[in-house]
Structure formats: structure tokens, C-alpha cells
Image (cartoon, rainbow, N blue to C red):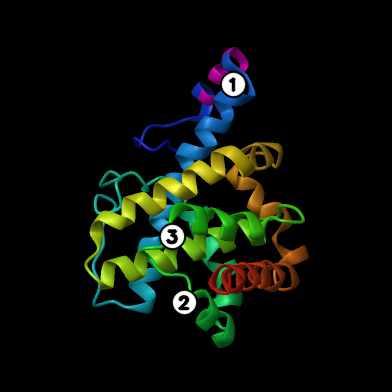
Amino acid sequence: MADANGGERGNENESRGAAGGEDVMDEVITEQGAVLLRRYVIERVTVEDPSVHVSHEDLGGRAHEAEDPQIKEVVHQLLKIADDLHKNAELQHLISTVQANCAQDVFMTVARSIFEDGINWGRVVALFHLAYRLIYQALTQNHFDIIKRIISWVLQFMKENISAWIRQQGGWEGIFRTVSRWRTVSFIAAMAFIVAAVYWRRTR
């Protein structure tokens, strides 16, 4: 899989991982996560609202950063998982109660709630989808300064909380090995955590 700068990471990752240890690999996973998130947002926007045009550059990336076929395949799998949420109108409505201009502590509270009782790929996708909804709000409201802030929060959370788990699954490609076991139940459960956290914050 290519890195955030569009270069190949194959053997380089292995040598850097051997020399720099797990922290280096987690950094690479976070860099790849940034590319995947931007591609996820673009693909989802294109499907849901073709009138809204957004590029990788708009989201703080590079023009051709997601051309790696492996990145496209991973994003395709992320989108397939997200369809479980997309088809649930009630959950979509509840997610919309989190505003794009929310404070960082609100975002982090919601993000932590998603993974409160463990990590799986469904919950990783739930984090991506929450970020997408906030970014989409910012795009449609012309609050472009908020977009990179949201992405930075996702990457900070990823680095601090889930990059090590993704590494243990063999990297982002690990999503292809376990998807069928949790796809519906875990995904809906993850969104229940979002709902609970949102209402907890709004009623304090």
C-alpha cells in the first residue's frame, strides 16, 4: 500500500519496522489511515451528493495519493461495511446531532465511546463515518477551516488508540480477513455507542 505521499511502502515498511520498531509501523498505519479517510470521504460524498465536489487537496492530501490499487480495495471494503449504517435512517438522524463545529473534547468523547468495549473493523468504520458526516456538514456550510481540524482529530485518536490494533491485524489489509463475522451486529452496536455519547453530552 502506498504512503500518504504516494510512494510504495512495501519493503521500506519492513526495513523501517525492523529498525524503528512498532512505533514506526504505527506511524505508517496512521499515515495510510489519513489517505484512506480522505478517499472514504470523497467516495461517500460522490455517492450521496454528486453536486458537492471535493478533492484530496481540499482535505489536506495530495492529488494522486490514493491511486494505489490496494488503497482503492480497502476503501471499497470500508464503504461496503458502512452501507449497514447508511441504510439505517434512525441512526443516520442520530449521528447528525453531532455538529461539525463541535469542540475537540466532544469529538474525542464520542470517538472513545465507539471503542468503549473493544476494537473491531466495524467500529473503525464507524469512526470514519462519523468523521465523514462532520466533514460533509462543513463542506455544505462552507466551513472549510473545520475540515482539516476534524481529520487531525481522527488521526490523533487513531494514533493513540487503534493503530497498534490495526498493526496486529496485519495492517489495513486485515479488514478482508474478518469482515463477515461482525458486519451487521457489531456495526449497529458501535453506532449505539455514538448515540449514547451524543445524548450524554447534549443533556449535561
Name the residue beneath numbered marker 3.
Answer: 40
Which residue is drawn at the image coordinates 21% and 67% (left, top)? 142
Q: Amino acid at mark 1?
A: Gly
Q: Is residue 170 left or right of residue 59?
A: right
Q: Contact (CB < 8 A) between labels 1 and 2?
A: no
Select label 2 or label 3 by which is in front.
Answer: 2
Real-space CA distance between mark 1 and mark 3, rounded to the nearest whole angstrom: 27 Å
Q: How far apart are labels 2 and 3 at the CA level?
A: 18 Å
Q: Measuring from the top left, give residue 127's x and y in whole percent.
A: 55, 59
Which quadrant of the structure image shows residue 179? bottom right
Which residue occupies 75% across, 65% down?
182
What residue is disc 2 on? Answer: 96
Q: Nearer the viewer, mark 1 or mark 2?
A: 2
x and y, in percent, of residue 65 in the image: 34, 44
Residue 192 relative to residue 135: left or right: right
Residue occupying the far front of the picture: 204
Mark 2 neighbour class, 10 Å CA radius: few under 14, some 14 to 19, many 20 or more: some
Label for residue 89?
Answer: none
Q: Nearer the viewer, residue 139 or 9?
A: 139
Crowd around label 3: few <14 · some 14–19 · many ≥20 (10 Å): many
* Residue 98 x %, y %: 47, 70
Location of residue 110 in the rendering, given as x and y in whole percent from the top left corner: 58, 61
Magenta segment range? 13-19
Are the residues flagged by discs 2 and 3 in contact, CB closer than 8 Å? Answer: no
Please indicate whether residue 145 sits to the left or right of residue 68 in the image. Answer: left
Q: Is residue 136 above or below residue 152?
A: below
Q: Which residue is mark 1?
A: 17
